[in-house]
Image (cartoon, coloured by chain):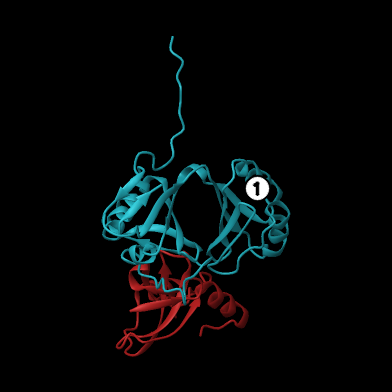
Chain colours: A red, B cyan
Amino acid sequence: MRITCPHCGNRSLDEFIYLGDATVQRPDPARPDALAAFVDYVYQRENPVGRHRELWYHNAGCHAWLVVTRDVRTHEIFGVEPAKEVSLSEKTTGAAR
Amino acid sequence: MHDSILTPQTALMGLINAGRYGRQEGDVGIRISEVKNFSLANITAFKNCREPLEKVIDEYLGLDLPIGPQRIEKNGYALIGHGPDQWLAIGYEENSASIFDKLEKASRDYAAIVDQSDARAIIRLSGPDARKALAKGVSIDLDPSVFHTNCTATTFAAGLWINLWQINDSPAYEISVFRGFGASLASWIKSSAEEFGYINQ
């Protein structure tokens, strides 16, 4: 599997570190049910088949966090975006994608 | 009482000794040398500061900031893009360190500029077989259609974290590693170059 880093170009898998689900959102700690929400946020993960959004870190290259949209069965990659931009656009639109 | 005499040593002193090595028949495929007496600074732009930083860099070095993994060289200075809003500045002349010092003072509001001159080793690799020797250790595509003069890459070579850039079409490359990894890099390059025959300069 190769990932096309938006900063560095097409790179081998061994340059990256996998973190996991990029769709989870940090809950507001002021929420009344914050404890339960944080337990979910930290521990609960879906185990989807097919297309998924994941966080990868370009360890051997530009040191940027990336959001990779990947089919977890076929490893086909549909898109790679800088996590910084994804996060900023979520803040602007106020919604997770 | 003895006067202590400290002699500066280059990162690869004694590791790239002049002579022809490897395959002895035919033409030499590769030339290897250590880049000595360079100055090197790491530049990281602060948020939304690219424009003012660009002006200061132009004033002191006469260079544009490269966009993406590119290299721009002029008058003995080079800027090498190695990540978003991050560059390496290299001065090949003796007095470059003092210019980087002035640059650092002038751009404090726009970027973190850190002198790493003594923290790096740089090896230059050139000749008709340089690409083939390099390709044995890096996993990026070095074909001239996608990686050519003034392209740069931050990647692994033989398990070492490197900055790589191409300086001309002969082809010639420069590879930078943290100084402590210099001996490992030199060792790998020499064994990789052996089948082509190489000259150390």
Provide the secondary structure element on which disc 1 rests: helix
Residue lying farthest to the bottom in this orientation = A50
Q: Chain of mark 1?
A: B
Q: Quadrant of the N terminus of chain B?
A: top left
Compare residues A8 and B24 and report the one nearer the observer.
Answer: B24
Q: Position of residue B85 (x, y in %)?
A: 58, 64
Residue lying farthest to the front in this orientation = B26
Mark 1 closeness class: few <14, some 14–19, many ≥20 residues within 10 Å: many
Compare residues A33 and B142 and report the one nearer the observer.
Answer: B142
Q: Residue at x 56, y 48 (%)?
A: B92
Q: Residue at x 26, y 60 (%)?
A: B195
Q: Position of residue A69 (x, y in %)?
A: 42, 84
In the displayed structure, would residue B87 be above or below residue B9?
A: below
- Residue marked by disc 1: B104
Q: Residue at x 72, y 55 (%)?
A: B56
In the displayed structure, would residue A9 be above or below residue B168?
A: below
